[in-house]
Amino acid sequence: MDVEVKFPDRHLSVVAAICEFIALAYFEQLKVSHDAWQVCAEALAKRIYRYSELTALQQQLIRETLIAWLQSQMLNAQPEKTFIRNKAAQVFALVFVTEYLSTWPKFIFDILSVVGLNPRGVDLYLRVLMAIDAEVVDRDIIHTPEIY
């Protein structure tokens, strides 16, 4: 089955990396879920390909998966490679843009409560803040009103 999603050319590589990261994290969570087949079947049946089209429960699962990934980073002996940390920060920033005011008002507090004073956590936290700045504030980047 071919899936076609169209994005502006300048965003293709970033969007592809973000989608891959979210998909992998989401599928890891689905592997341990007892109702994973229902989520997958519903997405296929309803042709759901955008974050904004997911149900509230599915979006909650993605939020929980992101926090679980962050927690695992605090426990891993080796930090993830830099490009993975940067892409993870971008994913967190995109979720922030989409959900901070409406669904996840404790976004910053939740991340801070996970990372604490752990040096690796502080690194990830600062990367997330820089990615949020790039998405929300930075005027050098062309922003679109498109919702992910």
Image (tube, grey):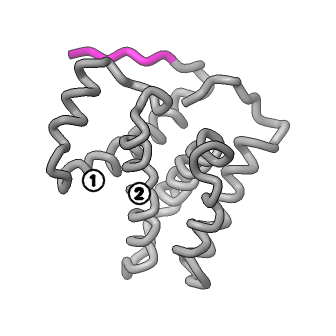
> What is the quadrant of the N terminus in the image?
top left
For residue 95, side relative to residue 132 (left or right): left
Return the x and y of residue 139 as percentages of the image width and height: 84, 37
> In the depicted view, which residue is nearer to us: 33 or 87?
33
Return the x and y of residue 97 as percentages of the image width and height: 65, 42
Amino acid type shown at disc 1: Gln
Vertical placement of 79 versus 131: above or below?
A: below
> What is the quadrant of the C terminus in the image?
top right
Query: Which residue is found at the position 37% from the left and 81% from the top?
Result: 77
Q: Which residues are magenta?
A: 1-6
> In the depicted view, which residue is nearer to us: 37 or 89?
37
For residue 128, side relative to residue 43 (left or right): right
What is the quadrant of residue 120 in the picture? bottom right
Return the x and y of residue 44 as percentages of the image width and height: 24, 22
Query: Which residue is found at the position 44% from the left and 26% from the top?
Result: 53
Residue behind mark 2: 64
Q: Which mark is residue 91?
A: none
What is the quadrant of residue 109 in the picture? bottom right
Instruction: Compute the Cα span from label 1 to label 2.
Output: 9 Å
The crowding category of the residue bearing disc 1, from other C-alpha atoms within 10 Å (few below 14, some 14 to 19, many at least 20), is some
Residue behind mark 1: 29
